[in-house]
Amino acid sequence: MATPQFKQLRHSYGFDDVAIVPGDVTINPDQTNIDFKVEGFTFSIPVIASAMDAVTDVNFAILMSKLGGLAVLNLEGLQTRYDNPQAILSQIAQASDAEITPLLQKVYSQPIKENLIAERIQAIKKVGAVCAVSVAPANTKRFAPIAAEAKADIFIVQSTVTSARHISKSYRGLIFSELRKSIPMPIIVGNCVSYSACLELMRTGIAGVLVGVGPGAACTTREVLGVGVPQITATMDCAAARDEYQRESGKYVPIITDGGFRKGGHLCKAFAAGADAVMIGSILAQAKEAPGLGYHWGMSHPHPAHPRRTRIKVGTTGSREQILIGPASVTDGSQNLVGAVRTALGICGVRTIQEMHKVEMVVAPSITTEGKWWQLSSH
């Protein structure tokens, strides 16, 4: 007699569970177009540096913009709490493992200074760089007008999990359709991992959705809360929502896969799974220009009662340009990410990221180990 099932589980896939099938025709990588568009902005590389204090400061945002990508400044981080954040960043880099969580909780308990929000945005804008900023839902109504007045270009509302409807007895939640009318810039919202949540978010009129819950190198949400969906499945489900929303509205809302990237092959798989752009943190935290000084930590780490992210030592492997554009000085796929994406498009015989969405993928859990005896063993 069959045992009745309480729940039906479906299999889900992360980057290392799948592989991309080559195309029947190949194209020169330099003839591919990997532009990423969000409302009125076009970026020549579909890579966004994450809104983490170890990754993005004013200088890094300017460098990313000059390179054709985008970096997001965290308006609730060290850059807006301290006039001289470099001193605090040095303390964090020098702290021992035993000291780090109390130190982060202490330095992030300083109040956010609204004048610094405007100053940081203006410092990015005055050199002609595109300025994207990120806030958590709780502070959005307070900081959005300041960011708009300072002429930020793109506004990102980001939390561990974001939905279009938030239920609370204590306050009227953030309503994205109202926010959309109140500030004159594209709004990107994250993070989500399901078809239904993504579709509902898009119906509020936002300009983009961040996909991913808990895969980041410095994030422990999946361990602490048990919440998340592996990135390939999350991306495919949200890509299906994007396509459905385009069918019903005529509007194409890009999805940005956020977190869990370690090498160029992961970016290529995210695009094959339906992503329009990727947001990366730990790989860019390894750049010599990154403010984290060889360390990386997540935005939820300083929570006073329930820290959920950890400081990790990522080291410094090369310049931001080496990591994104090359030439690579390492063989592990963590440099020349843009070259990897262009090459993958060429091998698959497609010219654009949107064509890459249609290439075949297979379930291949041994793709990174098959035949790699000499790389994996000490012999």
Image (cartoon, grey):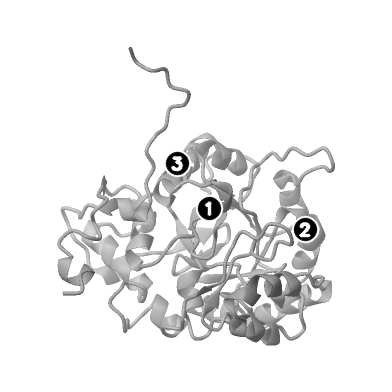
Q: Where is residue 74 in the image (x, y as percent from the top left)?
A: 66, 68
Q: Sequence-wise, which precedes: disc 3 or disc 2?
A: 2
Indicate which disc, 1 or 2, sits on the residue closer to the N terminus. Answer: 2
Where is 183 relative to 164, above or below?
A: below
Sort mark 3 into few (<14), some (14-19) or many (20+) by Cα contacts within 10 Å: many
Q: Is residue 107 left or right of residue 351?
A: right
At which x and y percent is residue 132?
Answer: 63, 67
Q: Give, as a three-letter code, the residue at label 2.
A: Asn
User: Which x, y percent locates residue 185?
Assistant: 68, 60
What residue does disc 2 label? Answer: 139
Kindly report the distance in space between the C-alpha atoms of the residues bearing marks 3 and 1: 23 Å
Residue assigned mark 1: 223
Do tag 3 and tag 2 residues touch (Cβ < 8 Å)? no
Quickly name the residue at label 3: 237
Distance from disc 1 to disc 2, alpha carbons, whole Å, reads 26 Å
Q: Which residue is drawn at 73% across and 86% down?
A: 84
